[in-house]
């Protein structure tokens, strides 16, 4: 089978890695910005609130997270919106795009734990199910979890019994690679379908997403496996695919040029593309921390400041992660 099909089964098959709830953070395979600090979600919500205040967003619309894991990000955003304007939780609709039933259950349980019965969540199995006049859609690290093809010297990777081989690439894939000056690396599968479905279902939309990668083609393989915070390149001799399959996470660096191309073709305008550090500071992260300092003791403030350093320090998440904002 093609590598993209193999990766799809690895992550989303009946026994796939994301089929059941996975711990994120110290006890899991990796960290995310969401698991690092609750102020990550607060900053994005602060930006959404700014759009609402300027009349660029609809307070009667939807706030939707795609791939919400346990629901931390959406809950952190709802909490901050309530702080800014308590009436927003009465006018806004809240949704999560999540196709795994076990994760849906975990999300509902966590949201109930945070807000009781005050916040109602609508689950969508796919972005194509979302029909709305306006929605602010947010996602953290979803584009690196789309299946991909692996291209090298005009050939694509195929997998047989967890062993990778190569066969001649189809002409359409070669033409895409030639257009983007790609000779070796990953070609994501599904960005076009995803962006088109969002465009067709949501009349007016702001889509904000964070992920790791660059706006250009690397011409090298970044695909790798995460296991308990250890990283194994896919072609590492020490990595046994039979053992890693569906048990460990598999990911790659996002080609944001491809993401932007897909969304603009679907009718979105690129509002911003910048490092995570620049985006979060522009969204109000430092202001939120200063507000927190006035009501917290020194120890609590120091803990949060240290977490925020992880989010924005150039040598940590700050530069490696990027934010892209599309508007339709």
Image (cartoon, helix red, strand yellow):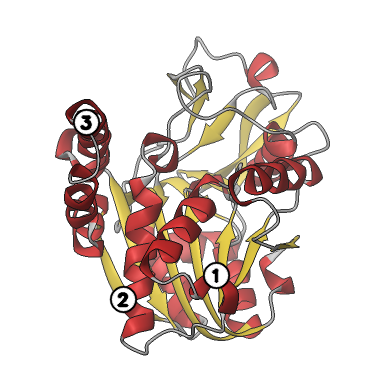
* Mark 2 → mark 1, Cα distance in angstroms: 16 Å
Q: Residues within 10 Å of mark 1 (few under 14, many from 20)?
A: some
SS class, disc 1? helix
Indicate which label's residue lies in the foreground, 2 or 1: 1
Q: What x and y, as percent, mark residue 49?
A: 36, 73
The quadrant in which the N terminus is found is: top right
User: Mark 3 or mark 1, which is nearer the start of the sequence?
Assistant: 1
Q: What x and y, as percent, mark residue 240?
A: 61, 13
* Mark 2 → mark 3, Cα distance in angstroms: 26 Å
Task: Please give the residue where the numbered disc 3 appears in the rendered image.
Answer: 306
Q: Are marks 2 and 3 in contact (CB under 8 Å)?
A: no
Q: Is residue 102 left or right of residue 207?
A: right
Task: Please give the residue where the numbered disc 1 appears in the rendered image.
Answer: 89
Q: What x and y, as percent, mark residue 132?
A: 64, 83
Q: Are marks 2 and 1 in contact (CB under 8 Å)?
A: no
Nearest the eye: 146 or 271: 271
Please tell me which residue is depicted at 76% across the width and 23% down the height of the picture.
161
Q: Quadrant of residue 103?
A: top right
Please tell me which residue is depicted at 55% across the width and 33% down the height of the picture.
250
Task: Please give the residue where the numbered disc 2 appears in the rendered image.
Answer: 50
* Mark 1 → mark 3, Cα distance in angstroms: 30 Å
SS class, disc 3? helix
Nearest the eye: 118 or 25: 118
Q: Is residue 180 visible?
A: no
Q: What x and y, as percent, mark residue 261?
A: 42, 72
User: Mark 1 or mark 2, which is nearer the start of the sequence?
Assistant: 2
């Amino acid at each position: 089978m093609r590598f993209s099909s193999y990766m799809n089964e690895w992550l989303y098959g009946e026994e796939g890695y994301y089929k059941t709830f996975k711990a994120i953070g110290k006890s899991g395979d990796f960290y995310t910005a969401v698991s690092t600090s609750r102020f990550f979600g607060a900053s994005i919500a602060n930006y959404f609130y700014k759009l609402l205040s300027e009349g660029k967003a609809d307070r009667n619309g939807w706030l939707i997270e795609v791939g919400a894991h346990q629901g931390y990000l959406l809950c952190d955003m709802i909490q901050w919106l309530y702080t800014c304007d308590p009436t927003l939780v009465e006018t806004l609709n809240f949704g999560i795009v999540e196709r795994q039933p076990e994760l849906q259950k975990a999300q509902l349980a966590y949201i109930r734990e945070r807000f009781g019965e005050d916040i109602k969540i609508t689950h969508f199995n796919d972005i194509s199910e979302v029909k709305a006049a306006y929605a602010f859609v947010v996602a953290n690290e979803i584009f690196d979890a789309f299946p991909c093809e692996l291209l090298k010297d005009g050939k694509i990777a195929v997998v047989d019994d967890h062993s990778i081989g190569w066969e001649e690439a189809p002409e359409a894939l070669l033409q895409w690679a030639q257009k983007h000056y790609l000779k070796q690396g990953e070609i994501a599968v599904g960005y076009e379908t995803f962006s088109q479905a969002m465009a067709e279902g949501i009349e007016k939309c702001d889509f904000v997403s964070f992920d790791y990668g660059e706006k250009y083609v690397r011409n090298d393989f970044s695909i790798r496996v995460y296991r308990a915070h250890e990283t194994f390149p896919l072609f590492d001799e020490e990595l046994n695919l039979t053992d890693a399959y569906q048990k460990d996470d598999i990911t790659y660096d996002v080609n944001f040029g491809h993401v932007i191309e897909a969304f603009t073709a679907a009718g979105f305008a690129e509002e911003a593309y910048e490092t995570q550090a620049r985006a979060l500071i522009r969204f109000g992260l430092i202001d939120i921390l200063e507000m927190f300092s006035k009501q917290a003791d020194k120890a609590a403030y120091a803990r949060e400041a240290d977490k925020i350093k992880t989010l924005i320090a150039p040598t940590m998440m700050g530069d490696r992660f990027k934010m892209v904002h599309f508007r339709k």
